[in-house]
Image (cartoon, rainbow, N blue to C red):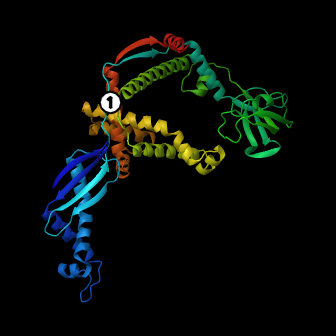
Amino acid sequence: MKSNVEKIERNRVVLQVEVETGELEKGIHQAYKKLVKKVNIPGFRKGKAPRKILENYIGKEYLLSEAADIILPNAYYDAVQENALEPIDQPEVEVVQLEDGQPFIFKATVDVKPEVKLGEYKGLEVKKKAYEVKEEDVQKFLENLQQRYAKLVNKENGNAEKGDIALIDFEGFIDGEAFPGGKGENYSLEIGSGTFIPGFEDQLIGMAAEEEKEINVTFPEDYHQEDLAGKPATFKVKIKGIKTKELSPIDDEFAKDVSEFETLEELKNDTRNKLKETAENRSQDEIRTELINKVVESSEVEIPNIMIERRIASFVNDFANRVQQQGLSFEKYLELSGLSLDQLKENYRAQAEKSVKTDLVLEAVAKKENIDVSEEELDKEVEQIAKVYRQDPKAFKAYLASQGTLDSLKQSIILDKAVDLLVEEAKIEVVPADAEEAQEERESN
């Protein structure tokens, strides 16, 4: 087989492939064996007609066309590999020559992954924020635990206060007309949680069980439903019941109830260590993000629109799945939000473009540095994911391979290793987080 590549514009190439006569003959024979079993030819049992008879019956051109369909996919794949191309779309195929006894020649016009002109990616200077874990951070964490494990008890006497849980019925009206999505029954609302629009929860404070009230609020100007944004509304509300939180004292007994530790001091030490680990992870994530942004901004690449459109589709699909997991159909979400599918896609465009460019730049770094993934590294990653889903690692790896996602996982590891290299090669100055944030604030002013 012979092949050559001609670049016709930006990331679009024409790949011309010539398949030897012998390979074409093999393809014709395969096409004959396939067609002879399907075609009824008078005087012959199905599958028994000689090739010449079949050719005369269906036409030589039809047989050759079938042979081309058999040969072309593998020939195209081999030519792509031979020329180290990375197609990003299906090719447009044009048959140049298809004759018995002659080489089979075809052209494939296809968009390929764009070339990246890398900027500087070694020796970049970044500041690592060192976040201090203070005792008040430990105390705040314990207080959050205290809230999480609080007992809810009926508030027999007294009115609703901030922090109480109110069971409410409500219905909203604009200009005296009820609006879609503005009604709820037996809704459990923590007063002060900020779940409802500003001003709503504050007006529940002081109400008693079984009390009814009209609450007047105004939807924020940036409210996600455009038809409600900025409009004044009246809600008819009834509090059907009030529960208050009963907090346990933060002591040794509390530590036993909410953790595996016997004493409060042990729980505090564990909390302190976890907060320090979280702070370190935050610092590491920030410098990784900053380094990626620096390299991406200094690199040049023309991104084919199809790559952006596919990334947008991926984002929209992920979002739709999250919406459905919350019990709302994607179509209903679009209706309630006042967004069209095209508007939602457009909202993702800038993010998708940046995401695609980031991947392309990191791939270029990995390629230049000969970064790859060993089978042991791949198995380790699969094992970690399988553990989360409580699956057998070998069976899970086989499943990923069957779904065609194993290569994607391998690529993800390569990109992570490329970022690791950026960090290893960077010049990192450690600074106190408070001082760095103060400096950033001064510069912004």
Drawn side of residue 315 relative to residue 113, left or right: right
In the displayed structure, would residue 233 be above or below residue 18?
above
The front one of 89 and 277 is 89
Drawn side of residue 53 relative to residue 299, left or right: left
The image position of residue 405, as x and y in percent, is 37, 47
- Amino acid on which the number 1 mark rests in the picture: Ala
The image position of residue 194, as x and y in percent, is 69, 30
In the displayed structure, would residue 117 be above or below residue 29?
above
Residue 89 appears anywhere in the view: yes
Q: Residue at x 81, y 42 (%)?
A: 175
Q: Residue at x 29, y 52 (%)?
A: 109
Q: Quadrant of the C terminus?
A: top right
Drawn side of residue 18 relative to residue 326, left or right: left
The image position of residue 56, as x and y in percent, is 22, 81
The image position of residue 340, as x and y in percent, is 59, 47
Number of disc labels: 1
Residue 253 appears anywhere in the view: no
Outermost residue, bottom direction?
43
Label 1, residues with CA under 10 Å away: few <14, some 14-19, many ≥20: many
Drawn side of residue 342 relative to residue 286, left or right: right
The front one of 314 and 62 is 62
SS assignment at label 1: helix
Residue 222's image quarter?
top right
In the displayed structure, would residue 421 be above or below residue 185?
above
The front one of 186 and 265 is 186
Q: Residue at x 61, y 47 (%)?
A: 334
Which residue is under mark 1? 418
Outermost residue, front direction?
8
Q: Quadrant of the N terminus?
A: bottom left
